[in-house]
Image (cartoon, helix red, strand yellow):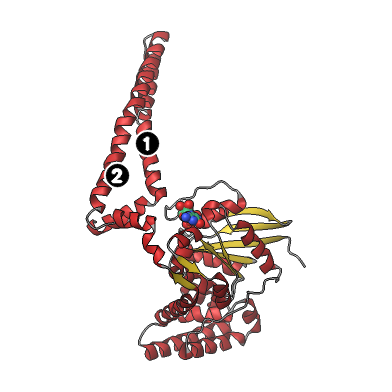
């Protein structure tokens, strides 16, 4: 049976291009920017593709799916409870190692996943050659290239979504990232306890629950507690397993799990990623090196800030004069029209002069915010923060 509406959840690291792709797909006009927290609210939109109605949800950007930040909790709760039909993990293709960490967690949750290797243009400019087919086979996840800013790859992505939903794609398969003998043994023990109550085992990925319990994940612990008798037994087993592992590895289980995931990613990247010498010639990297240079970075920063204030106050002075003249003129007109007295005083010296003294700064504010927006969207502000961080 075909479902009426297919739900697609967009996940990904912050700044991987989720909102850009969301806007491309749904056509909804929304703000796209780098301010942290912009996507904490849930955004939804619909798109019709090949006669199917797809509902797209832009989840908060996260690096991982632990329960440390509100973004992670929001994203995870949606994935676990709303069970979207397909999860599209938007990956910054020029930063695969860091970005694939989230993918490993999504794979572990057992969601139906598609990887969108976004920023394919940046990856190419840096000389990164990615063998998408091999990556897909290794992860058991279909992979498509996209360039959000050029609206490229969107149809391919939606085609892939339909293929996965209709079980037509040949790449999807459920892989287990192996955590090594000791960890696997403990995960299995926890799973066995959960499976004593098949109604629980069927509702959740028991492997995921097991891993999260080993990570001492408070949100999952709460959930497991709600399973009743089996829940209690599971938590006791998890506690025992954690202790055993801490003794064996002389480290917390979550550290060991993180290491193993990065080990898995590193191994996969060795096979699918080639970085050519061309990357040294990349222009944007050169600019980066200059802007974030230890010594040159400061004068450049001071220059930009100086230029911004110059623009704000010298260019802003002209419209300020016009507004001032207009307000004075308007005050004079009202003075001439009304007889001297309380009302005239209220209008001329109170309201007109009062509002006038505020809107006179409007040009300055507009220019200042325009400059900040330019710094922000070109990515300069992030670099400025990086160099100033040392001083601060
Ligand atoms: P989000 O934080 O994941 O929602 O990311 P955004 O959609 O806000 O994108 C972050 C920045 O990357 C924006 O400045 C986008 O214009 C830019 N961007 C998105 N996709 C691409 C892409 O494929 N190539 C390039 N060069 N830039 C992109
Ligand atoms: Mg966003």
Q: Residue beneath label 1, please?
A: 367
Residue 83: x and y in percent read 62, 68
> Which label sits in the foreground, 1 or 2?
2
Q: Using the image as rendered, state which of residue 337 and residue 132 is in the foreground.
A: 132
Q: Is mark 2 within 8 Å of ligand 1?
A: no
In-image side of 100 versus 283 (left or right) = right
Q: Quadrant of residue 94?
A: bottom left
Residue 3: x and y in percent read 73, 64
In-image side of 262 versus 28 (left or right) = left
Kindly tell me whether residue 3 is visible in this rendering: yes
**Residue that lies at the very extreme toward the right in this rendered image:** 1
Q: Quadrant of residue 209?
A: bottom right
SS at mark 1?
Answer: helix
In-image side of 192 versus 121 (left or right) = right
On screen, 352 above or below 276? above
Q: Residue beneath label 2, please?
A: 304
Please name the residue shown 34% across and 57% down the image. Answer: 286
On screen, 202 above or below 92? below
């Amino acid at each position: 049976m075909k479902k009426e509406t297919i739900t697609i959840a967009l996940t990904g690291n912050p700044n991987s291009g989720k909102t850009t792709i969301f806007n491309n797909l749904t056509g909804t006009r929304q703000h796209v920017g780098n301010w942290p927290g912009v996507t904490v609210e849930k955004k939804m939109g619909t798109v019709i593709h090949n006669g199917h109605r797809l509902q797209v949800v832009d989840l908060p950007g996260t690096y991982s799916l632990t329960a440390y930040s509100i973004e992670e909790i929001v994203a995870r709760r949606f994935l676990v409870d709303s069970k979207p039909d397909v999860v599209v993990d938007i990956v910054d293709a020029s930063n695969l190692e860091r970005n694939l960490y989230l993918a490993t967690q999504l794979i572990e949750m057992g969601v139906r996943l598609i990887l969108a290797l976004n920023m394919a243009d940046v990856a190419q400019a840096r000389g990164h050659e990615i063998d998408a087919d091999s990556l897909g086979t290794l992860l058991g996840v279909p992979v498509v290239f996209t360039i959000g800013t050029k609206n490229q790859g969107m149809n391919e992505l939606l085609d892939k979504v339909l293929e996965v939903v209709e079980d037509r794609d040949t790449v999807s398969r459920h892989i287990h990232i192996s955590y090594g003998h000791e960890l696997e043994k403990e995960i299995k023990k926890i799973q066995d306890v959960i499976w004593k109550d098949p109604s629980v085992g069927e509702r959740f990925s028991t492997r995921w629950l097991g891993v999260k319990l080993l990570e001492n994940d408070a949100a999952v612990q709460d959930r497991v507690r709600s399973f009743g008798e089996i829940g209690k037994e599971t938590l006791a087993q998890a506690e025992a397993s954690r202790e055993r592992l801490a003794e064996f590895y002389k480290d917390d289980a979550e550290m060991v799990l993180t290491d193993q995931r990065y080990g898995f990613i590193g191994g996969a990247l060795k096979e699918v990623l080639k970085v050519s010498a061309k990357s040294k010639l990349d222009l944007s990297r050169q600019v980066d090196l200059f802007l974030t240079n230890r010594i040159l970075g400061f004068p450049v920063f001071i220059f930009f800030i100086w230029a911004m204030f110059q623009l704000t106050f010298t260019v802003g002075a002209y419209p300020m004069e016009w507004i001032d003249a207009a307000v004075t003129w308007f005050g004079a007109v009202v003075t001439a029209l009304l007889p001297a007295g309380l009302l005239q005083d209220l209008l001329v010296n109170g309201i007109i002069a009062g509002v006038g003294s505020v809107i006179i700064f409007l040009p300055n504010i507009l220019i200042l915010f325009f400059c900040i927006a330019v710094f922000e969207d070109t990515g300069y502000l992030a670099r400025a923060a990086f160099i100033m961080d040392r001083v601060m």
